[in-house]
Amino acid sequence: MSKLASMTGFAREGGTLPDGTSFVWELRSVNGRGLDLRLRLPGGLDALEPALREALGKRLKRGNVSATLTVKREERAPRLTPDPAALEQAIALVLSVAARIPGAAPPSPEAVLTLPGVLRAEVVEPDEAAEEARRAALATAFATTLDGLVASRAREGAQLATILTTLLDEIASLREAAAKEAAGQPAAQRARLMENLANLLGEGDLRARVPEERLAQEVALLAQRSDVREELDRLTAHINEARSLLKSGDAVGRKLEFLTQEFVREANTLCSKSASTALTRIGLDLKAAIERLREQAANVE
């Protein structure tokens, strides 16, 4: 069974970090000429990027991949602590003011603490061990999400394999129809040549007026110009090669895209050499099927 992979896929994975923070990883991939990863990480997590790029490069060969990490932190009120120097200054100030006002009540502690600069947010020293555990949890979750993306691309690839196989069957069928039609071209060209000569020379025995050898030369020349056996043979070779690529299980997208260009070349030549309306019609149908093949092959990794 083919292990063809598409470049299109999506995966999402969420969880909770050791500190209770919730997060979500989202990975999306679309067609691309090479492998391109765009990371969107919250501030302070840039250190994760090299390891994430390395992990993705080991699993994927082609595609434009965007990875987005959303971290939702709960807003907590900062813990306040008095500034000793500012507190002493504030107490001294309010006591001095109260002493100058006869009968004034002594200032309350609450009033002193509300003075600007008395309270400040407590500075929490970073816990490197906790940060490391946080980064490790996010990297593990990324690996799980990447597994999901690979699986998603594999499912798309299985569908692509079916579509491509069907298109190759259609192209092979049209190739056989073209071979049958082309086999009758020499006789048809001879009959057309005789008819044209009769119209030009009028009634009478053409063989008496045009040497048989000359007629044979003209028919041979026409047959040579319209001989499509080489194109049909190359089409057969391309079809067989495409089938082998689909079965190989490798990242064959580039090879398939190149091969479809060769398909187009042979179909164009076949149409240009066609000496009958029926063969031209088959050639046009062949070009349409090859174009659909090319569009689908552009999705293969």
Image (cartoon, rainbow, N blue to C red):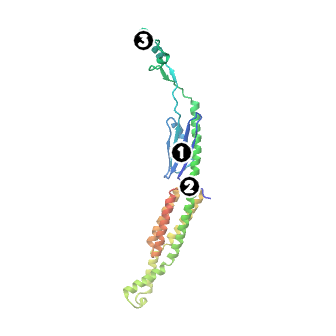
Q: Where residue 57 sits in the image (x, y, percent)?
A: 55, 46
**Mark 2: which secondary structure?**
helix
Q: Quadrant of residue 133?
A: top right
Q: Where residue 187 sits in the image (x, y, percent)?
A: 48, 81
Q: What residue is pinned by disc 3?
A: 97
**Mark 3: which secondary structure?**
helix
Q: Nearer the viewer, mark 2 or mark 3?
A: 3
Q: Alpha carbon of mark 1 to alpha carbon of mark 2: how far?
A: 18 Å
For this view, does 205 lie left or right of residue 48? Answer: left
Q: Alpha carbon of mark 2 to alpha carbon of mark 3: how far?
A: 79 Å
Q: Amino acid at mark 3?
A: Val
**Mark 1: which secondary structure?**
strand
Q: Amino acid at mark 2?
A: Glu
Q: Where residue 195 sits in the image (x, y, percent)?
A: 42, 84
Q: What residue is pinned by disc 2?
A: 156
Q: Is residue 293 above or below residue 108?
A: below
Of labels 2 and 3, earlier in sequence is: 3
The quadrant the N terminus occupies is bottom right
Viewer-closest of 125 and 250: 125
Task: Give the number of the disc on residue 26.
Answer: 1
**In percent of the image, x 48 and y 21: which residue is there?**
119
Q: Residues within 10 Å of mark 3 (few under 14, many from 20)?
A: few
Q: Is residue 210 above or below residue 290?
A: below
- Is residue 214 visible to us here? no
- Is residue 56 visible to us here? yes
Q: Is residue 204 above or below residue 247?
A: below
Q: Where residue 62 sits in the image (x, y, percent)?
A: 52, 51
Of labels 3 and 1, earlier in sequence is: 1
Q: Amino acid at mark 1?
A: Glu
Of labels 1 and 2, earlier in sequence is: 1
**In percent of the image, x 49 and y 64: which residue is there?**
290
